[in-house]
Image: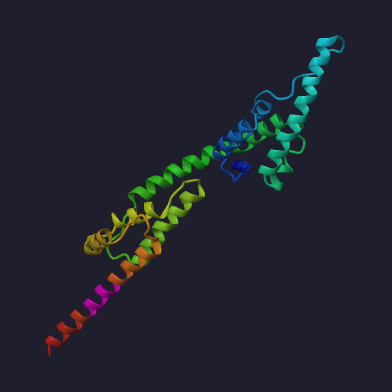
Amino acid sequence: MAETNFVQPAIPRFDGHYDHWAMLMENFLRSKEYWHMVEIGIPAAAAEGGEEIEAQRKLREDAKLKDLKVKNYLFQAIDRTIVETILNKETAKGIWDSMRQKFQGSTKVKRAQLQTLRREFEVLGMREGEKVNEYFACTLTVANKMKGHGERMGDLVIVEKILRSMTRKYDYVVCLIEESNDLTTMTIDELQSSFLVHEQRMHAHWKFSDFFHKDEKF
């Protein structure tokens, strides 16, 4: 009989993007059947006496044990510098609520900043007279800021953006690149190299033309 290997899900590490982390962490805790410890917390202690109260006490002790496990998962997910600010939180629910209060607001700010960067990226275009290296640097600066604010952006998005936003003098090389390359596997460095070669050829052609026309005057 073949053995089945079950891969344990990794504990999602908090990277500063609260909404995304909270979604992953909730899913992780639900898979462990511990999410109710965050939603509800440990049941309040009841008055002593009677069989029903004894049953409630056992449920409470079981909840405390589960709460310790959830706290352990949260401590592993959160950086030490953040953990030090929530050590006074005695339950997993307390830790979760504190994280939401601390970071959900900053996430909203990041989301607003990301929307601004998306608009900047969309309208970005190469200016007349701008060098290839300058335009690539400008585009990558905006793209890297977007990634820093949580945007998932692969090379293909940047490659396609650059191809559709070059000045008209690069139309020929754009067509050539699109026809002779698989854009899904093309790197930004490869794209930049192709445009630099074309730019150098145009520069050499202009220098030759200037020299030829000067020579004609004599």
Q: Position of residue 58 (x, y in %)?
A: 80, 20
Figure check: 28 above or below 202: above
Residue that appears at 77% across and 30% down: 65
Quarter of the figure with the N terminus = top right
Residue that appears at 40% across and 64% down: 189
To which quarter of the image does residue 128 belong? bottom left
60 relative position to 218: left or right: right
The rendered magenta stretch, by its main secondary structure, is classed as helix
Figure check: 194 above or below 16: below
Q: Position of residue 6 (x, y in %)?
A: 61, 41
Residue segment shown in magenta: 199-207
Figure check: 207 above or below 38: below
Q: Is residue 157 magenta?
A: no
Q: Position of residue 34 (x, y in %)?
A: 67, 29
Figure check: 114 above or below 167: above
To which quarter of the image does residue 98 belong? top right
